Image (spheres, helix red, strand yellow):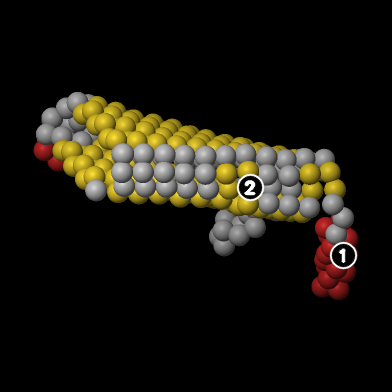
Amino acid sequence: MKIKLSSIALALSLAYASSAAIASDNNAVFTSQQQQHNMTYVQQIDTSQSNVVVNQNGWANGVGNTETLEGGIVQQQSVGASARVDQTGNGNYTNLVQTQAGFSNVIVTQQGDVNDAQLSQSNTVRSSIEVRQVGGSNANVARVAQQGADSSALIVQDNGSLGTFGEITQSGAGNHAEMTQRAASFLSARGDTYVKLIQDGSNNTARAFQTGQGSTAVISQSGTGNYADTAQTGYGDIGIDQTGSANVVFVRQNLSGSDLDKQNLAYVTQNGTANNTTIQQDGFANHVRVVQR
């Protein structure tokens, strides 16, 4: 059996090496898996206009290895590549990497609890990533990293709870990052849901919208002409740090609690010239701190 498996592995590796050496166009991979503990791995290298679609229905399934958090979908030197992952169930995982893949797009949808999406695009231009997670009573996690210009990232997390976390990191100019979290109404502790947006470059836009009690949003931007827009319904914390010139901050916080430990907190720091901050708060015992230098 070992000899047979080794022969099969050798044949597959030779076939992969041969195909990788020749650029190809319009490749497509479609997979569907049911039940649990399934894994999917896809590699597309030096292709154009290629497409991957993965559907998994069950629990503890992975686009990649759910234990080592490796593998998944890899699209390299793939201009115009697209990937879509749909997972239904609990404890599912998606890892996806696109490199040197301009004008590419990724869409990931996860329905269930304790799901995890880790997505990245590097050396890209005008590419996009969209993540939508719908949970019941437990935490979902989504992380997006983009390196390039004029790209966009969107994360939407619904019915989140303690530990629901979303992060977008972008480097380059003209990028757009947006996160929406709509938390379960029973949340009460600070940091129940958490948004983190980091942008390094100029003329970038970061938006964070949170509904529910105990939300936290953190935004960091470096460069000129950046814009940060945050809104919270239900008491929460907002922290924004901008370094550069002609940057703009807009904060809205509504419906704080009636206790001193349930007020809205807004902290803004701007380092540079010609910066602008606007903060609107509605509720009881709210705090604002703005530092411009």
Task: Identify the image quadrant of residue 71.
Answer: bottom right
Marks 1/2: CA–CA distance? 29 Å
Q: Quadrant of residue 267?
A: top left
Q: Earlier in the sequence, mark 1 or mark 2?
A: 1
Query: CB of mark 1 within 8 Å of CB of mark 2?
Result: no
- In this orientation, which residue lies closer to the viewer: 262 or 129? 129
Question: Where is 167 relative to 252, above or below?
Answer: below
- What percent of the width, then of the height, locates residue 11? 88, 64
Q: Tell me the residue that label 1 is attached to.
A: 14
In this figure, which residue is indicated by the disc labeled 2? 124
Q: Position of residue 121 (x, y in %)?
A: 60, 49
Crowd tier of the residue under label 2, counting other residues whose Cα lies within 10 Å: few below 14, some 14–19, many 20 or above:
many
Q: Amino acid at mark 2?
A: Thr
Amino acid type, mark 1 = Leu
Left or right of 176: which side holds 274? left
Residue 82's tag is none
Which residue is at a point 57% across and 58% down the rendered structure image?
Answer: 69
Which one is nearer the viewer's eye here, 96 or 192?
96
Q: Residue at x 52, y 40 (%)?
A: 175
Residue 280 point in image, percent of width and height? 23, 28
What residue is at 57 percent from the left and 62 percent from the top? 68
Where residue 116 sits in the image (x, y, percent)? 51, 48
Mark 1 or mark 2, whichever is nearer to me:
2
Q: How many marks?
A: 2
Residue 35 seen = no
**How many neighbours does mark 1 have within 10 angstroms: few (below 14), some (14-19), or many (20 or more)?**
few
Confirm whether residue 284 shows in the render.
Answer: yes
Say which residue appears at 63% left-offset and 43% top-offset: 125
- In the rendered view, would you say 19 is above or below 105? below
Q: Secondary structure at mark 2?
A: strand
